[in-house]
Amino acid sequence: MNLSLALIQWALLIVARVALIVIGLPVVALAIPFRTEGVSASDGRAIVNLPRWAWMFGNDYDGLFGDKRGWWADNTPFGWPVGSFAAMWWWAAIRNPVNNLRLVPGISCPVSECLITYRGHYSVEDKPDRGGWQFVTAKRHSGSSRWYGFYFVHEWSKTRAFVIRIGYKIKPSHAGSDEPAKGMTFKLNPWKEI
């Protein structure tokens, strides 16, 4: 297990991501009035997204109105309308900050081009009866690039869990798949609803 390399990678990513999140707070606010119509990179549906000059802070998969399931529309803070400035800003700057960073080559993990190995449990989710831990490594077939992800879920009950997810959102099940590139996450929640 390359824990020391993973810790160095994660530390550098945290510094870069925090800096970009802070920069993104005003950038997203300035860019929303200039939003443009587009097409989702994940499923081809029509979306509204930030303009090209604010691309990194946008969301090429879901745009500014939230996920395709409609979860965001039903769960915006304070009951804001999903198309309101406040809801779009919260989605792009707070809920999914710097979302397109996962599409930047060299920063994102191209799981379809990698050999994926793991330690721990094959499947871990922050859902009931899916607890456990895994340390996953993705190594590019051609080259020495590596990406690391750690996922830990300790269920307190059928509805609450202690969750840690650090590094890349890579899973053992991505091995041999044609999944799109995966981005990074840093989640620590001692009382997450599951």
Image: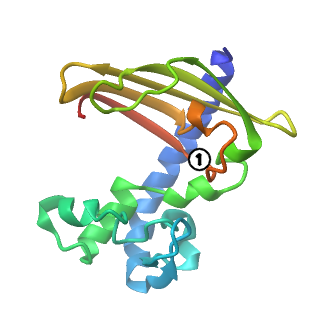
Above or below for 77 versus 189: below
Q: How is the image coloured?
A: rainbow
Does residue 8 appear left or right of residue 37 in this picture? Answer: right
Furthest toward the left, the residue is: 78
Q: Residue at x 12, y 65 (%)?
A: 79
Q: How many marks?
A: 1
Q: Position of residue 27 (x, y in %)?
A: 45, 68
The x, y position of residue 28, in whole percent, is: 42, 69
The C terminus lies in which quarter of the figure?
Answer: top left
Please name the residue shown 27% across and 29% down the image.
128
Where disc 1 sits, the SS reads loop
**Viewport quadrant of the N terminus:** top right
Residue 38 seen in the current view: yes
Q: Nearer the viewer, residue 7 or 190?
A: 190
Percent from the top left, x then y, of residue 150?
Answer: 52, 26
Question: With respect to residue 94, does 186 lie above or below?
Answer: above
State the residue at coordinates (52%, 68%).
60
Identity, as a three-letter code, of the amino acid under mark 1: Lys
Please state if 152 lies on the left or on the right of 169 as rendered.
left
Q: State left or right for residue 164 relative to residue 44.
A: left
**Residue 110 seen:** no
- Point out residue 142 in the picture as x, y percentages from the top left corner: 87, 40
Q: Nearer the viewer, residue 161 or 179?
A: 179
Neighbor class of circle 1 (other Cα within 10 Å; few <14, some 14-19, many 20+) is many
| Residue under numbered circle 1 | 182
Is 23 left, or right, of 80 in this rendering?
right
Q: Residue at x 47, y 85 (%)?
A: 37
Q: Quadrant of residue 190?
A: top left
Q: Where is 149 relative to 77, above or below?
A: above
